[in-house]
Image (cartoon, rainbow, N blue to C red):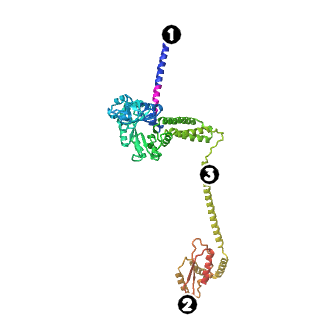
Amino acid sequence: MRTFRKMLCLVLSLILILGIAGTAMVAFAAEEEEKQPAEITTSFVNPNGRVLSVAKYGNKRLYPANSIEGINNCIEMGVDAVTVSVQETKDKQLVLLSGTDLSKLCVSKADGKTAVAGKVSNCTLEDIQNNYCLKADNGGEEGVATTYGVASLANAISAAKDKILIIVNNGWKYADQINEVAKSLDACDTVILRGAKDTDKISKYVTKYGTSACRVIATFDVDNDKGNAKDYIGKALDAGAYIVELKAEGGMASIFNASPLEKFKDKGRAMISTTKSNLCGDREDRQASWEELIDLGYSMIETDYPRELASYLKQIETYRTELTSLIATAQGIETSIYTKDSVKVLEKSLEEAIAVSSEGCKSLNDLDTARYHIQEALDDLEISDGNDRAHLSTWVWLLIIVGAIVVLALLGLFITKKINKKRTEKRRFERFKKTFKSEVPTENDETLTTNIAEDEESNRGLTEEELAAAAEPLEEAPQEEPAVEEASADTETEVGEEEPADSISVEEVSEETPVEPVEEPVADTPKIEIIELKFDEAQDTVEEPVVEEKTPQSLSEMLNLETQEEKTEE
């Protein structure tokens, strides 16, 4: 019996433990499921995160603008953000209404038909919520009555927290009040204030509230605001605005160029509204325009077609998931068994795919193109046969060939220049050789040799002193360029004076004195002056010598000049 009781207690204890564990697991799973939509907030705070869809006033085709029901419907569709407008009541509370005139927006709850006259500021929050219902769509005088009540801002934030972002269109006007409400609900990350323009005021707001403040959307209208979009974007982001909404009526405006939108990289998000054509460069509110704007760099798009936009963006993320899976597959392949060419194609497509998948602001076409290329590269991988060689591309081969041609051309020019130089030097040497061969002693030189021999024979009877005296004028003869006047004076002296009978004249000595061989001039050949003296017997005077200066060009020419000089002296 005791054993049975023990076993029963043990079984009951196990059941209790399993029940508690199961309950905890279910609760944990439910909590995780509730926290899952917070991915919207995470994506939003990443400036390079995925593209976010923004529904204007909720889903107006099914529910009234600014209604809790419209916000909940957007959450169900997977929309990332919804815009609302708020008005201040008599008791300083904020309600979700797009205007201050109750007659255009609400009907009486009592009969559901009677339009309510008056201003929002004349009623308290309790009066409005207890007595009025919203009109369909965005209201108006002909608006259809509904049974949906007017919500407060606090109601809307509570419904949206961690599920969808709330963008308050005129939030900058009520910035302080909205911040207080968001702080009380711990939902500052959920609320975004729209409508700020002055960057100095934005900076003061961020300084005042710090990191706990609701984020701000700065707005720049190209057609109405001063300055240029690029400068304003930089100033707004530096001031603390996280989003900059850009508007332009013309399709060629600067906000549709790449340069201004590059300012957002790693700093913030670019937002644009396609709800009216004059806000987005005359574009329509449909997929083609959304894709074009995403390609430009806009990561938040406001639309009147939230279901379609949300579906398109979900398709983008589906392609991104598939692309990420393909990237993982490609990275896990052992490429060593495949040919180098096919591996190179795969590596290139893999690099492009990683770049596309890592950037959130990419259109469906970009992701689809990257997915296609990497899949094709995977399918085209070829097994190597072991003899695979690295093949160079056509452009590389072309560059190699051009380079080789240039090198050969330069080498040819260099060799040609060397050969021409050698030929020129050889021709100069040949001319030099021929010149000096032509200057070898010929007939004149033989005559000179005969004269020298005769002089030696006639001089054998002279004494050494007489020979030395006769040689002195010859040693002094080759003086360089003697003045004509000095030669003339010496000549007159020689003519005027009578020589002793027993003396020997210079001419005689010179004829009999042996002529030593003349060495070939090396560098500077001296000029030899030939002086011709003409003696006039009648006047017994000597005429002015005629001097002819000649520069001998060679050995034979110099010898000829000396021979002429001797004849002149005779």
Question: Left or right: 115 with respect to 280?
Answer: left
The secondary structure type at the circle numbered 1 is helix
Provide the residue designation for mark 3: 401
Q: Earlier in the sequence, mark 2 or mark 3?
A: 3
The residue lying at 40 percent from left, 47 percent from top is 227
Tell me which corner region of the image, top left, top right, bottom left or bottom right, holds residue 218. Answer: top left
Tell me which corner region of the image, top left, top right, bottom left or bottom right, holds residue 382. Answer: top right
Camera-side residue: 516 or 249? 249
Are discs 1 and 2 less than 8 Å apart at CB?
A: no
Camera-side residue: 453 or 375? 375
Name the kind of residue labelled 1 in the image. Answer: Phe
Provide the residue designation for mark 2: 540
- Classify 10 Å Cα crowding around label 2: few (below 14), some (14-19), many (20 and above): few
Q: Earlier in the sequence, mark 3 or mark 1?
A: 1
Circle number at residue 4: 1
Camera-side residue: 49 or 95? 95
Does the magenta segment cover residue 34?
A: yes
Circle number at residue 43: none
